[in-house]
Amino acid sequence: MRVQKIGIGEAHAKLILVGEHAVVYGQPAIALPVTILKMKVTLTEQGFGQYIEDADMRRRLERMGEDFEGIRQLILRLLAKFHAEKLPFSLEIDSNIPRGRGLGASAALATAITRAFYNFFDTELSMSDIFYHVNFSETIMHGRASGVDAAAVNSSKPIWFVKGTPMKTIDVTLAGFLVIADSGIRGRTTQAVSIVQNNLIEKTEETEKSIAALGQLTHDVRKILGTDNLESLGVAMNQAQENLEKMGVSHPTLETLIRAARKSGALGAKLTGSGLGGVIIALAPSEIDAVRISQSLALSGAQNTWIFNI
């Protein structure tokens, strides 16, 4: 009996600790891997058709919705690369990364798909290949992609990212916990990027100051991560949030959750990712504090929360 051929690819979520949006304009960003949230893709050869399947539905490749156009184009490109445009397959997606929340779900999916195709065709995959394919998909999905998501979902360590330069990992001695809280509102990356672009035209000086401030805060946080000063990290997170609000990418629901986190003992709290929805992160000195903050956030309207070590 013929053995069914399969390929498997995996990735994990990420979050931006500090530097979102400013990273698009040449400033650094620090991203953390979130390995408790994972993406797995299984590519299986079948008798006919080309199907994408997840927990919600099964659909033909040509009938994927607008939200998945970057992924559809990526699959077409990978099929062409391996001269397998007519390959009948089922691509199964298994993920607990919430989509549209700034946690890198689309980059993780593009990574897992790329890994699955290369695994299926028994081809060695370099990091430059991954970044090429993932950034191709991300640019279609989000417009002017910085590349930080592609780098972060492929790293097991915190990363220092500057657009156009090689990714660097960061050694962290700081011990603390981060609480991720889902606002329940889908983030809007393309709109958020456009808001910053427009503000650079209409409120040039103020927006440039915020971008520069976020860049300086990112440099400060890199130093803080090599210390045991959690309080300083919390202060930097709060200052970053102030600048993101000035840039117009926050949201009233996010700010409600941020206030609730700080009131319940968080040392700092901010949005993470593109904003206009998505998730916030709150810094806690201990797991007990993190649980208390998580419970407070749930009572304040968070749809879901996750706790992990920095």
Image (cartoon, rainbow, N blue to C red):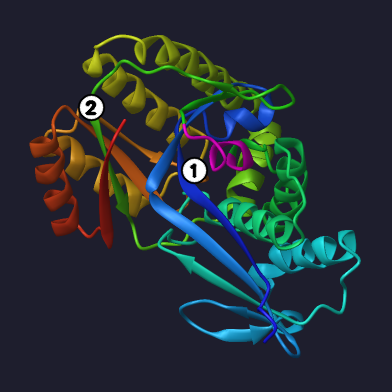
Q: Secondary structure at mark 1?
A: loop
Residue 195 left/right relative to 156? right
Residue 258 left/right relative to 26? left
Which residue type does callout 1 highlight? Gly
**Which quadrant of the structure image shows residue 240?**
top left
Residue 215 visible to an observer of this rendering: yes
Residue located farthest toward the front when viewing the structure as drawn? 1
Q: Is residue 122 above or below residue 258?
A: below
Question: Which of the labelled discs sits on residue 273, or is there none?
Answer: 1
Q: Residues within 10 Å of mark 2 (few under 14, many from 20)?
A: some
Residue 100 visible to an observer of this rendering: no
Q: Is residue 44 above or below residue 80?
A: below
Q: Secondary structure at mark 2?
A: loop
Q: Residue at the location (13% across, 30% down)?
A: 286
Which callout, 1 or 2, points at the residue further toward the start of the chain? Answer: 2
- Please say if the residues under marks 1 and 2 sit with CB atoms less than 8 Å apart: no
Residue 234's x, y, as percent? 27, 23
Numbered label tally: 2
Q: Residues within 10 Å of mark 1 (few under 14, many from 20)?
A: many
Mark nearest the camera among 1 and 2 is 2
Which residue position holds label 2? Answer: 176
Residue 38's x, y, as percent? 44, 55
Task: Give, as a single range, the part of the protein colored magenta.
Answer: 149-156
Marks 1/2: CA distance?
21 Å
**Which quadrant of the structure image shows residue 67?**
bottom right
Q: Between residue 121 and residue 224, name the one nearer to us.
A: 121
Which residue type does callout 2 highlight? Gly
Residue 227's x, y, as percent? 30, 9
Q: Is residue 95 magenta?
A: no
Q: Residue at the location (12% across, 50% down)?
A: 296
